[in-house]
Image (cartoon, coloured by chain):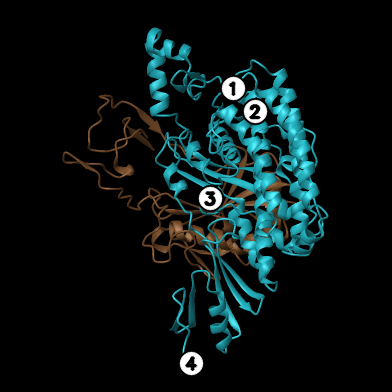
Amino acid sequence: MTRLTDPYASSRETTEGTVFSVTGGDWDSLVTEIGATKEERVVVNMGPQHPSTHGVLRLVLELEGETVTEVRCGIGYLHTGIEKNTEYRNWTQGVTFVTRMDYLSPLFNETAYCLGIERLLGISGDITERATVIRVLMMELNRISSHMVALGTGALELGALSPMIFCFREREKVLDVFEMISGLRMNMAYVRPGGVVQDLPDDALAKIRATVKDLRHSFKDNEKLLVGNSIWMKRTEGIGYLDLAGAITLGVTGPVLRSTGLAWDLRKVQPYCGYENYNFDVITADTCDVYGRFLIRISELEQSLRIIEQAVDKLEKLAGQPVMVADKKIAWPAQLSLGGDGLGNSLDHIREIMGTSMESLIHHFKLVTEGFRVPAGQVYTAVESPRGELGVHLVSDGGTRPYRVHFRDPSFNNLQSTSAMCEGSMIADIVGAVASIDPVMGGVDR
Amino acid sequence: MSEKGAFGAHGTGDTSGYGGLVKSKATPGSSERPYGSYFDDVADNLERAYPDFADAIEGVVIDRGELTLHINREKLVEVAFILRDKLKFEMCLGVSGVHYPDQIGRELHAVYPLLSITNNQRIRLEVSVADGDAHIPSLVEVWAGNNWHERETFDMFGIIFDGHPALTRILMPDDWQGHPQRKDYPLGGIDVEYKGAVIPPPDNRRSYK
């Protein structure tokens, strides 16, 4: 058979069969060529650069017609060696690294890491209430911004453009709050061992109250777009099925686990950061499918708003409390203020270390360059991130730098369930199933 | 075990002029009963459900409110099945490797955090093997979700999980040499030269420790 000559769709013979390279705009010639071969079975590489794979995820699909018989995930394209890097920085500097792992939920990475260090140091009980409430406030705002990306891109990948526009508009409002509080919209390294890096600005609570009101109104628009939408339901109902037994054996947590009807949320069952003092509900579904996970994320937005409102109320009562532990051997200088040349240490602090107290200067220098020593041992701390259980395994050898930092990222674990969800389904449904897991490749590959 | 001096590099001179700092590195040792919290119950139930308990458990460490069971690797799979089926630790949250080059004969550790949803409990299993014989039985048949985690630990530490369905690299490229998270992995760095000076890799730089 003479092959068509097409500069975009070349083919070559290998021991595995004929390999076609497709670079776009050449589908007709490809279909003609594949139709001419006797093979029923086609192996397709989807990704890593593919708009529907939710990041640099590579899916190797074995197809019979349009039915997927086997799926394998290829990951590692975003591996940056963050865990290794933290071993050559002090404990506080590690925050700046770990915040970049799962880049859609930086505050969860930071908080889980800092809770681990605080347990190693034995100062978990010394963290001020104000610092803890600020952490909760920031995490719940972050859960909203993360779910907004999950819902927006999930819809986009299934061909619904409008929800993405709305979701990113809402996410922007949350990022504005982050920018106001920390100076950064993402990867803010705001949570530090012993507390948070600086207190909220004076007008932050009023701004958050206004944002909550605004978001609650906008979420109604979002719901109207997709909840009960017949096209959306046809693409998501019964798709990506994973039941309770499958989820447990695969170690799947988060909205995917809750879509099997199990109300497992670490904020409720193993509370940390004082979550037992907030009123909120754990949302579940019993459909085990993409639509159920979508509904869970939609409803969790309202629960996060409830927690944020309670946190703001608490913060009003806790005005004036410090946001860093009292122990000066651990407390990173946390009196930042905005000067003429940008954000930096407050003038009072500079005056003290440069003008009046030599000892303060030495202390500041030692703490910032050398860091603090953490007693030897290991801990495992977990928080409920928007994607499930984010676990941190920390090992200290008694030095100023971590001996081992390992993040059990929920995306990494949950992505394993792709095969269980997709094998036997249509190729178009893979996109919906992967989107419902909501993997963030920065967290998967670290 | 203790170390002297404030800086990390040896033989290059401590420019602080002060060599009197002594750091003690005491790793928490084995614990005695009572363990406290629900840990006594877990140990009792395991002892009752598993007759070879004394052979399998090399040590019990209670530290910072967490229970670690050091398991003999020959018995790991048996213990894991008992923990899953009898003690209801339904979920294994993966495996994390740690490399201790100083612990001769037990250089590589694999750490498994377990979670019981039924009883709302957490424990940790730890298996130690020698660098020259880095084989640990795979737990994929017990907890299928450990598949990728074991591949990652193999990739990063070179621990071979016997019985794993497809133990290949997962984060690094397939043809990569070496296992990056090991402490003896050469860091190299980039040759930056300035007036004859070369910037050494991070583990050879002078630093606080």
Q: Which residue is mark 2?
A: A134
Quadrant assignment for the N terminus of chain B: top left
Q: Which residue is mark 3?
A: A442
- Identify the amino acid type marked 4: Met
**Callout 1: chain:** A
Q: Give the alpha-carbon distance from disc 3 to disc 4, as whole Å.
A: 46 Å
Q: Residue at x 25, y 44 (%)?
A: B192
The mark lying in front, picked from 3 and 2, is 3
Q: Is residue B119 visible?
A: no
Q: Is residue A427 visible?
A: yes
Q: Earlier in the sequence, mark 1 or mark 2?
A: 2
Circle 1 crowding by C-alpha within 10 Å: few under 14, some 14–19, many from 20: many
Q: Quadrant of residue A69?
A: bottom right
Q: Is residue A9 left or right of residue A173?
A: left
In the image, which lettered chain appears cyan?
A: A
Q: Give the alpha-carbon distance from disc 4 to disc 1, as whole Å.
A: 73 Å
Q: Secondary structure at mark 1?
A: loop
- Identify the amino acid type marked 2: Ile
Q: Which residue is mark 4?
A: A1
Q: Are marks 3 and 1 on the same chain?
A: yes
Q: Residue at x 28, y 38 (%)?
A: B9
- Which residue is most to the left? B196
Q: Secondary structure at mark 3?
A: helix
Asked whether disc 4 touches disc 2, contact meaning CB atoms under 8 Å apart, the reply is: no
Q: Which residue is mark 1?
A: A199
In the image, which lettered chain appears brown?
A: B
